[in-house]
Image (tube, rainbow, N blue to C red):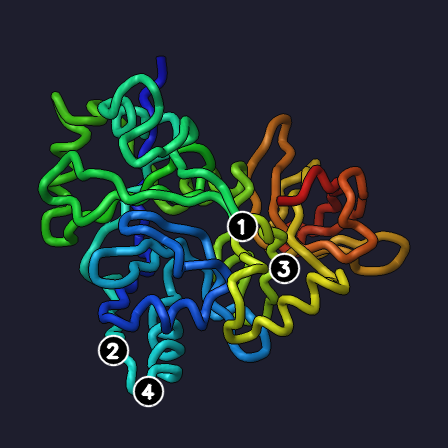
Amino acid sequence: MSVPRLFRLSAVSVVDLVGEDAVKIAQNLTTNDLGTLESGEGVETFVTDVRGKTVGHFVAFRTPVGLRFIGAAGQSRAFINHVERYTIRESCEPTAHDEDVVAVVIGPEASGPLFDERGESGQDESGQDESGRGESGPGGPKYRQLPSPHAKTLGIHEVPWLGGRTVVTLVDVLSADSTLDEICGTHGLFEGATIGDDVAFHASRVRAGFPWYGVDLDESNLPQEADRNDETICFTKGCYLGQETVARLDALGQVQKKLVRWSLDRLPEPGATLSHGGKTVGRITSVASGADGGAIALGFARRSHFDPGSVAEGVDQESGIAFRGEVVGTF
């Protein structure tokens, strides 16, 4: 039986909004409904600007003093600037903890011990279901902050990054090495587990089909282009910055490109484009090795190639080798 792998990330974005108006401010800047979250609950959401473009992509958790946002590295400064721009007299203080913590991602196959301690039913006292998440509603599944099994962890949060019961553990950066030794050492919660790096994490993420902000998405994209509408957008929450654009796209269905999953017969570098009939129809943003020398990738497709089974051809920019791609699904 193989030993489950954990992943130590070089960086993540962690921003706390604290203050009596923190939820109100965040609710006015995000696509999902944060106002109905109970303490310890979280949802995946986009942060949008006045044009409806994505300022950030996070899982946002309600805390006793406000909200915590966790996501891909490199988002914190832009997000804090965005919050401060739209905070006038309200009580809301944003603080980034990117430099204070080390993030350890625990994939579904390894996170079992965290859940098993709560009983065999797969449901805790708060009503969490067997998937490790709360019930789904408008705006998608709810995630939860979990009790910490170790005193030096600053929080354990469920996230959708690797599918299933994935969690991210935030460890105090000053004690990260010793804490990980204790967690993975003899008699530790994950005794004997190997710890993967960023490269290994992103390969697993691509295979799970989760887009990473700053890699697959950025501030040029509209929320619907990520094709995670059910998980990230609540169409009944009311007004927020950029809501008019998001609602109009939903009503008219006019998004011209979106992320899809590609199956490739070669392993190209990210950035490779795909063409069909003399027209560019796709672009690879993340890629991981697959079976028989092939690859699985995330990337954009034009409207002509939204449907599974759509095919296109490309040329790897580094090697000059041609490859073939087929859309195998959306999100």
Q: Do tag 3 and tag 1 residues touch (Cβ < 8 Å)? A: no
Q: Residues within 10 Å of mark 1 (few under 14, many from 20)?
A: some
Task: Give the mark nearer the N terminus: 3 vs 1.
Answer: 1
The residue labelled by disc 3 is 224
Q: Do tag 4 and tag 1 residues touch (Cβ < 8 Å)? A: no
Q: Position of residue 65 (x, y in %)?
A: 21, 62
Q: Position of residue 209 (x, y in %)?
A: 55, 42
Task: Give the mark nearer the N terminus: 2 vs 3.
Answer: 2
Is 39 positioned to the left or the right of 159 in the image?
Answer: left
Residue found 29% across the figure and 30% down from its top: 124
Q: Secondary structure at mark 2?
A: loop
Distance from Cα at disc 4 to Cα at disc 2:
9 Å
**Quarter of the image that includes the N terminus:** top left
- Looking at the rendered structure, the kind of residue marked 2 is Ser
In the picture, the disc for residue 88 is 4
Distance from Cα at disc 3 to Cα at disc 4:
30 Å
Q: Position of residue 296 (x, y in %)?
A: 61, 38
**Quarter of the image that includes the C terminus:** top right
- Name which quarter of the figure residue 134 lies in: top left
Camera-side residue: 309 or 53? 53
Q: Residues within 10 Å of mark 2 (few under 14, many from 20)?
A: some
Q: Secondary structure at mark 1?
A: loop
Residue found 81% across the figure and 43% down from its top: 310
- Looking at the rendered structure, the kind of residue marked 4 is Ile
Q: Secondary structure at mark 4?
A: loop
The residue labelled by disc 1 is 138
Task: Give the mark nearer the N terminus: 3 vs 4.
Answer: 4
The residue labelled by disc 2 is 91
- Looking at the rendered structure, the kind of residue marked 1 is Pro
